[in-house]
Image (tube, helix red, strand yellow):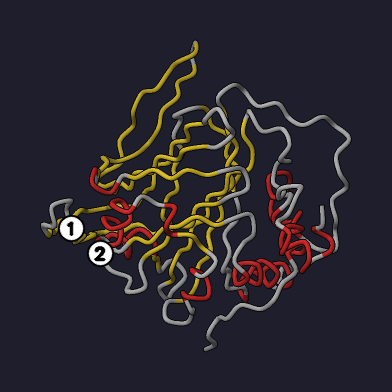
Amino acid sequence: MRLLRPHAIPISVVWRYVGSLCLAGCAAWRADTPQEPSSLPPTKLAAESVVLETITFRLPLGQTDPASIWQHVDEQRIDADARRRLEWNGIRVGVIGSQLPPMFAELLAEEDARKDAPVSHVDHLVTMPQTISRGRGAPFEIVSPERHAELTSLRRTANGQLVCESLTNSQCVLIVKPYPRDDSRVELSLEPVIRHGQPTQRFLASDGDSVMKSVSGDNHHFPELCWKSELSPGESLLLTCSDESRGLGQAFFTDATQGDRRQRWVVIRLAQTQRDNLFPLGMPPTRAPLDRALLDPEMAP
C-alpha cells in the first residue's frame, strides 16, 4: 500500500477542477471540458448572504504524510485558546489560502482520471462537492457518514477535566453559521454536536394541506469546542483529526463506511459574498501573488 505524497500540479490545473464545481458538480472539473466564461451578469446575492463550497478528502489512516498537507495551512489564524481546546480533543484546524495543498490537487486529478471505471472497482477518496448559500447566521450541517450503534466519547473540558460519555444510535454533525462583515470577509461559527437516540419528527411549518417536517434525534452539545474562524473570499477552512486520531476528533473526522477506517479532511471554502463582486463564484482571485504568477504564467495579472 502506497504512501500518498504530493506532486507538483500547476495552479491553473487545480482551479480548472475547482473553478466550476458550483455550476455542474464533479463533471465540470474535467480538464478536457473547459468552461467558457459566462456572458450573463454575476449572480446577485441576497443581502447579508454568502456562498460556501465544501468538499471532503477521505485518506487511509497511516498512509498519508500529514506534514505535506499542513505545511500549506496557516493554523495561527485560529484563536490560540480555541486551537488548544480543539487539540486537547483530537481536532486540528487551519486556514488554506487561495490554492489547495498539492496533495489535494493530485487527488482531484486522480478522481477525474478514473471517472469511467466501474463503480464497484472505484475507491473514492474525494466526496461529491456541495455549494451552499446561506444568510447571516443561517446554519448548515456537515454530517459524518458513519452512524454508531454506540459511541463512547472521551473529551477534555475547558478546565482540563476528562469526561467519558456513551451515546447510542449516534452520528457526528458539524453545525456551521456564516456571519458576513462589511469588508467582504465572513466569520464562520462552528459547533460540533453528536446527534443520538431515536429519530423524531418535528413540526416546522405548514402551508395549506402541506406540512414540512425534519427528522432527527437529540443533539449532544460541546460548548467548550465551539469556535470561530474568519475567511476572505477564496480562502478555505480545513478541519480534520489530529495526527494521533483520538477523542472526539476520531469520532468526527474518521469513518469506516467503505471497510478500512479513513481520515476525513473537510474543506469549507468561501466562494462569494454579497459585498464582493470582483471574485467570480468558484474561481481564484483575479490577481495572483507575484511569486505564484512567476511560477505559473497563466496566473499572471
Tag 1, which secondary structure?
strand
Residue 272, x across and y down, in percent: 64, 38
Judge by depth and name the residue closer to the eye, 107 or 280: 280
Q: Are marks 1 and 2 in contact (CB under 8 Å)?
A: yes
Determine whether 145 is above or below 116 in the image: above
Question: Quick one: 33 or 208, which is closer to the camera?
Answer: 33
Q: Residue at x 48, y 68 (%)?
A: 70
At label 1, the amino acid type is: Arg
Mark 2 residue type: Gly
Alpha-carbon neighbours of circle 1 within 10 Å: few (<14), some, or many (≥20)? many
Residue 46 location, quadrant: top right
Q: Is residue 85 above or below residue 44?
A: below
Direction from residue 163 to residue 14 in the image, left or right: right
In the picture of the structure, the residue carrying the numbered disc 1 is 156
Relative to the observer, which residue lies in front, 278 or 169?
A: 278
For marks 1 and 2 on the same chain, the one whose residue lies earlier in the sequence: 1
**Which tag is nearer the camera, tag 1 or tag 2?**
1
Q: Position of residue 136 (x, y in %)?
A: 48, 27
Please determine whether, in this image, residue 296 is positioned above or below residue 236. Answer: below
With respect to residue 139, does 285 lie above or below? below
**Residue reaching furthest to the top:** 208
Q: Disc 1 versus disc 2: distance between alpha carbons?
A: 9 Å
Q: Residue at x 20, y 53 (%)?
A: 167
Q: Residue at x 72, y 64 (%)?
A: 291
Residue 229 in which image quadrant? top left
Choose between 122 and 240: the one closer to the eye.
Answer: 240
Q: Secondary structure at mark 2?
A: helix
Query: Which residue in the structure is indicated by mark 2?
Result: 247
Instruction: Using residue 23 as the reference point, say whether residue 95 is left or right of it.
Output: left
